[in-house]
Amino acid sequence: MTCAGDLTTPALLADAGVLEANMATMSAARPGLALRPHVKAFKCTALAARLAAADHVGFCCATVREMEGMAVADLGEDLLLANEIVDPQVAGRLGALVVAGTRVTVAVDSSETIDVAAAAGIREVLVDVDVGMPRCGCDPADAGRLADEARNAGLTVRGVMGYEGHLQHLVDRVERERRTALSMAVLTTAHAEVGGDVVSGGGTGTWDCNHVVTELQAGSFVLMDGDYAQLGLPFAEGLVVLTTAVSVRPGQHVALDGGLKALAMDSGGPQLVDDQGGAAEVLFCSDEHTTVAGGSWAIGDRVGLRPAHIDPTIAKHATLHLVDDVTAGGDAEVLESWPVDLRDW
Amino acid sequence: MTCAGDLTTPALLADAGVLEANMATMSAARPGLALRPHVKAFKCTALAARLAAADHVGFCCATVREMEGMAVADLGEDLLLANEIVDPQVAGRLGALVVAGTRVTVAVDSSETIDVAAAAGIREVLVDVDVGMPRCGCDPADAGRLADEARNAGLTVRGVMGYEGHLQHLVDRVERERRTALSMAVLTTAHAEVGGDVVSGGGTGTWDCNHVVTELQAGSFVLMDGDYAQLGLPFAEGLVVLTTAVSVRPGQHVALDGGLKALAMDSGGPQLVDDQGGAAEVLFCSDEHTTVAGGSWAIGDRVGLRPAHIDPTIAKHATLHLVDDVTAGGDAEVLESWPVDLRDW
């Protein structure tokens, strides 16, 4: 048996029970293809295979690397690149997947993305509609015209996509539901112009208040994170970066051997799994350390940190270790060690 | 010839001329072993080899992985792990390097770290002294006692180390110099108790106001970053994440295909290499996108972003491309492509 204490720290741990429970909760509400898990959240085909085994065999990707890795892992039954491709070389990599038998659908939101997709041998698209977040997606008024353009270019238009990313983290549930409905009304109108069976969108934050999408693009729910945890969703936090106390100044501070190269900082710093009854708190992170004020740890103790944002945290690690209890520190049993094989581009 | 425009974006670019000029400026002030370049800043043995070719053959590392990678790359003439090791397995990896002929020195700041080093076959240490930043380093009053302990354990004590990391980014130069002198006075006193030839410390921010260290542990100067750039140091910014404009809403915003998985966010968001005369500004980063307000980019244009912090930005990428002009966008010529081979732990 391998214990988490045998791993070189910092080590990325996922709780097997939390993962299973989060998946069960989501699957009950959104069975099979009603959920299109977003692999950008975890970048790991072994974890994706667990979702596929639970009948969620259509996946959502954010990068070409993710699309290729999922295909190699034989998880390419229905892959959506929920992102725009404008580089013919990159589109060509997707075209090669199509030739090899992977079902590839890409988002398009402009004449240029349609032309690039068609030229690369991609056959299926969704029209990506701006539903209020300033990022990708066409002007809703252009959706019908773009669908016509795509069909004229020989592409099959499966439907629409629209991501209400700006609403995912709204803490007030009533406000989140109200604004999601407004945002999805835009998508419904565009869908009427575009046609097709698919309405793709949503995320972990709107998992039960987005009543429009036919497939929910959620990923973070599998292991959650500090930022989403404020919403009171029925998904538990299951990701921990395990560190070792490498330097201790009794009564003052402790230096842990995992810092901002092991933990995403975009949504704030990490939280201690066990703050020793409020006696300890994270002071700051530097490249390879986190300094904790207070606490009574000894040199060599394993100390867990919960990241504020799981997606970019996982992308910083080569391996995700599945353990029996992520709160057990070095005593946790390592059940499986999964490569984070969808990193990079 | 490969152009940066041929690379899959996001792509990490380093400016060859800036790198050379920054190295020349530093080497003139701190020739040879007076500089101990910190590889944590760039995690790339090909870049380290450039520094070694300029006579800086002693290196500083933050992780065991960096130590091993440097040894494999035949850059192990004098490697300092400027960090504490308390895990016997990890120390054993360093002991194996010693057996293989690498000169390994590690920082110790406690009886535990001394015992672990001695047991692993590590032969040389520096006593790491707390000079004011709450992280690693012993109470200065304990330095002499720890040196005695180390010698009694059979270790050679090469001297002391003390990192004034809390002063590196002080914008006021007079204040930075004044406080560095105070901080280094602590190290000088400890050194008198410890003995040995080496006084190791400092960084890019205190490169010319730390007059105490015999070897400067600087790394960021090679390519600089937004955070350090405020200090008015004679090192130029040479690192850019090249992205592609994948979605454009004319007069509103542009979505670029590199976000917080390609750019470190701990010191703030990225800056545009070219803000089109102030017409454009970064609005926010999401996982795989940066949204820019304003500007007149067309779909497919390559757009450069300067990260606020280079160390964790480089650690997010598998490859660092050396180019002739990092401000030239897709037209830059790719001179060399270097693996970021010291990532992970």
Image (cartoon, coloured by chain):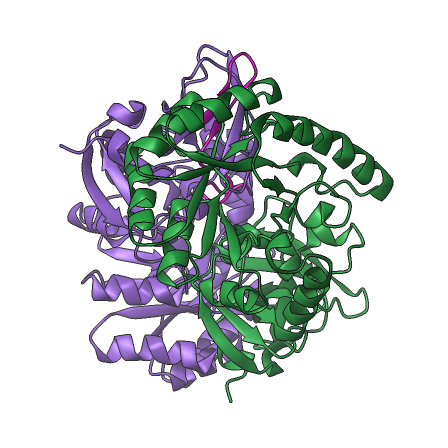
Chain colours: A green, B purple
* Observer-nearest of A304 and A185: A185
* Observer-nearest of A33 and B158: A33
Name the residue: 51% across, 14% down: B250
Q: Main secondary structure of the magenta part?
A: loop
| Figure quadrant of the N terminus of chain B | top left
Q: How many numbered dots are placed on residues in this image?
A: 0
- Tell me if I can see residue A4 in this picture: yes
- Tell me if I can see residue B41 in this picture: no
Q: Is residue A307 above or below residue B93?
A: above
> What segment carries the magenta color?
B246-265
| Figure quadrant of the C terminus of chain B | bottom left
Residue sitting farthest toward the bottom: A1
Name the residue: 23% across, 30% down: B17
Can you give x and y, in whole percent of width and height, for residue A332 in the image? 61, 80
Q: Is residue A128 above or below residue B163?
A: above
Name the residue: 45% across, 74% down: B147
Can you give x and y, in whole percent of width and height, for residue B306 in the image? 43, 31
Find residue B194 and report its image quarter.
bottom left
Left or right, B204 with reference to A335:
left
Left or right, A87 with reference to B86:
left
Residue B255 colored in magenta in the image: yes
Find residue A180 and report its image quarter.
top right
Can you give x and y, in whole percent of width and height, for residue B323 in the image? 23, 33
Residue sitting farthest toward the right: A174
Q: Is residue B244 above or below residue B210?
A: above
Can you give x and y, in whole percent of width and height, for residue B166 in the image? 56, 46
Find residue B234 and report its image quarter.
top left
Residue A90 colored in magenta in the image: no
* Observer-nearest of A197 and A188: A197
